[in-house]
Image (cartoon, rainbow, N blue to C red):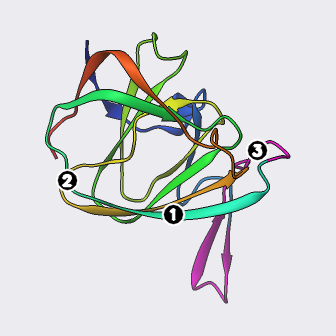
Amino acid sequence: MNIDAQPLDPDTFKPFGEVVQPGLGAVKMIRDGTVRQSRPEAALPHDAAADTAAVEFYECAATEAPLVATKVEHHPHSMQLFAPMQSARWLVVVWPEGLESTPAAFVARPDQAILYHPGIWHHGIVALDRPAQFISWMWRTGGPTDTVFADLPAPVSIRWPAA
């Protein structure tokens, strides 16, 4: 299966999670007009048993096209936030209806972060164009199902446009 990634758009990504970026949600000027503050309406859903906040950092080498996906993951108890700290474009790939479904792939800009809904199957973080650093945040139960990994039934080749 071959998939072409499209630009990450908040409306298109809504079934899988939320895009958070400057300028979305409530926007106002603060600090005597020197700072524009954006407050996205993003929710941070999680099970009550997932009561421990976990912050992780990812330092990723750049990936060349195409990405051949063979493994995916999901987090049944919590949403997961990925926000670039140092990056160029980066790739977001989701399987909207489980491992047998056709994936959707998106190219995110360096000023976009995403929140995966709980239970959404997704590929691990992928840096494009150059190495990148990301911060991740989610709720954890401390049990073995905080992150569930699975092999795809068949490899999926994902392409994206050149920078």
Q: Is residue 19 left or right of residue 71?
A: right
Q: Main secondary structure of the magenta part?
A: loop
The residue pinned by badge 1 equals: 56
- Disc number placed over residue 62 in the picture, else none: 2
Residue 30 belongs to magenta span: yes
- Disc number placed over residue 46 in the picture, else none: 3
**Pointer 1 and pointer 3: residues touching (CB < 8 Å)?**
no
**Pointer 1 and pointer 2: residues touching (CB < 8 Å)?**
no
- Check disc 3: other Cα within 10 Å, few if <14, some if 14-19, many if 20+: many
Q: CA distance from mark 1 to mark 3?
A: 17 Å
Give whichever of discs 1 and 2 has the lower sequence position.
1
Residue 33 belongs to magenta span: yes
Q: Is residue 149 or residue 126 the one in the foreground?
A: 149
Of the two numbered discs 1 and 2 in the rendering, the one whose residue sits closer to the viewer: 1
Relative to residue 115, is residue 132 depicted above or below?
A: below
- Check disc 2: other Cα within 10 Å, few if <14, some if 14-19, many if 20+: some
Q: Is residue 95 or residue 88 the one in the foreground?
A: 95
Q: CA distance from mark 1 to mark 2?
A: 19 Å
Quadrant assignment for the N terminus: top left
Tag 1 secondary structure: strand
Point out the stretch of residues depicted in magenta: 28-49
Q: Which percent across, then down, holds residue 48?
A: 85, 46
Tag 3 secondary structure: loop
